[in-house]
Each structure stands twice: as C-alpha cells, then as structure tokens.
Image (tube, rainbow, N blue to C red):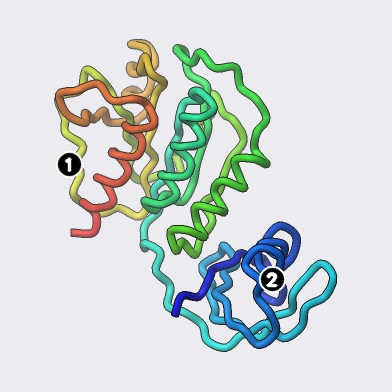
C-alpha cells in the first residue's frame, strides 16, 4: 500500500501547503499513516493523531534508514531561462546534489531575479517525489569570483568546457566534497576558464556534442555520482 510523503521541519505536525495537500487534496484522516521527512536526513513513518484547522499533529512510529550519499556534490549553475532553470533544479535534486549556487557569468543573458522562494518550493517538491531525505541548500546568487572564494571548501573542483579533452568519467576516486561549475548556453569565456584553472579547477567534457546548459548540469552530476558509487 502506498504511503504519501510530506515535509515537516519539526516532524511533529504538518502545516501550511503540506497540510492543505494532506487533508483537502488527498483526504487523509485520523489514524492514517504518512511518511514525513525534515530535510536534515530524518524520515519517519507517522500516524495522524489530531487534525486542527490549519495543522495535523503526528505520532512517530518508525524511523527509516538514511538513503543519502555519504559525499557532498555542489553545483554552481549559470542562470538561464526561467523554465530551463526550474527544470534544472527539479532534476538536479533527483540525482542527489546537496548544494546549489545560482551564478552570473560573462555570457549570462538572463537578468537575475529574486525567485528564491519559488525555487525553494521546487526543490522541496523534488525531494518529496524522489525520496530525498536532505533538502539541498539553495544559496543566494553569486558571481564567479565569489564561487572561486567559496571553492576553497571543496576537495575536488571541476568546470564544464567545450574545449576540454578530459572526460568527466576520468574522475573515479570518491572524494568527500566536489564543486561543479556549469556555464550558460554559450559556455564559459576563455578568460573565465583561465581564472578557474589558476584557482585549482579542472576542466571536463561530456562528449562530442553540445549540450544545453541544464542538460550538461544533470549529466555531469549524475555521471560523477555513479562513478563515485562504483
């Protein structure tokens, strides 16, 4: 029997949009069981013990095993068209990314907009659908220089390049933390690639064909994760 998943930061109750979906859409009632995760790696089978006007109280029954990967992959994705960026967010969460940095690069053509609240909802919904127990951290929009400063916290630093001769599948050794930079449709500029290499980043290729920016992000991260899992 299928049990629906819900997000609750305190694991004690379901509120707001989640409550509306629980009671008004799915028609859950007292005594029924749901899966509830807090976005920090904890997930429980819970029983609904009380339904109030705007929330449902829960009783924890069983804690589920943590399914998250034991390594951290972060992605710095150049801001692209709204629909494409939202598709990127949904799919990148599904493959297992743990941190997201929207960035502005030299060839970025889309004007940055403050859509963090909308983006956060997309991320949470993708976590619910895919079984993720950790909600990836969504950072504020950064410049490439800011990303370079942040990159000191990562063991492996990579960027996609149309000029690279190095296949991403060459990176087989699992490391605890990786940062991947993906440029916009026009890629990163020659100067940006030069600066990244000077700051400890390695370039990689995804094959003979030119991929859309969001496709490159999804393929590169999923390929790296599968490589680390071997």
Q: Which residue is drawn at 29% across and 39% down?
A: 219
Q: Nearer the viewer, mark 2 or mark 1?
A: 2
Residue 126's spot in the image, x, y percent? 49, 52
Dividing the picture into quarters, in which one does residue 47 lie? bottom right
Counting residues from the N terminus, which is met first, the one under dot 2 or under dot 1?
Answer: 2
The answer to which quarter of the image holds residue 91 is top left
Residue placed under numbered mark 2 in the picture:
10
Q: To which residue does mark 1 refer?
A: 169
Residue at image position (50%, 75%) is 3
Looking at the figure, which quarter contains the C terminus? Answer: bottom left
Taking 66 as reference, is 94 above or below it?
above
Q: Position of residue 191 (x, y in %)?
A: 37, 11
Give yes or no for contact between labels 2 and 1 (Cβ–Cβ under 8 Å). Answer: no
Q: Describe residue 22's horizontal placement relative to residue 108 as left or right.
A: right
Which residue is rendered at x = 54% and y = 68% of the image? 5
Compare residues 161 and 10 and report the one nearer the observer: 10
Residue found 81% across the figure and 67% down from its top: 54
């Amino acid at each position: 029997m299928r049990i629906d998943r819900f997000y609750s930061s305190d694991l004690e109750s379901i509120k707001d949009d989640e409550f509306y979906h629980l009671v008004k859409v799915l028609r859950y009632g007292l005594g029924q069981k749901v899966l509830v995760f807090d976005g920090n790696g904890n997930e429980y089978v819970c029983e609904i013990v009380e339904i109030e006007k705007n929330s449902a109280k829960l009783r924890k029954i069983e804690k589920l095993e943590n399914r998250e990967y034991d390594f951290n992959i972060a992605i710095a994705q150049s801001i692209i068209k709204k629909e494409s960026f939202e598709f990127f967010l949904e799919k990148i969460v599904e493959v297992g990314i743990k941190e997201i940095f929207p960035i502005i690069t030299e060839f970025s053509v889309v004007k940055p907009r403050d859509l963090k609240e909308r983006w956060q909802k997309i991320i949470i919904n993708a976590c619910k659908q895919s079984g993720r127990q950790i909600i990836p951290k969504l950072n504020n929009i950064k410049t490439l220089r800011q990303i370079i400063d942040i990159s000191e916290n990562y063991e492996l630093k990579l960027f996609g390049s149309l000029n690279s001769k190095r296949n991403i599948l060459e990176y087989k050794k699992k490391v605890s933390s990786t940062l991947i930079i993906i440029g916009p449709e026009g890629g990163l500029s020659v100067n940006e690639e030069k600066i990244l290499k000077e700051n400890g980043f390695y370039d990689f290729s995804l094959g003979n064909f030119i991929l859309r920016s969001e496709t490159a992000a999804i393929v590169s991260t999923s390929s790296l994760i599968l490589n680390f899992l071997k």
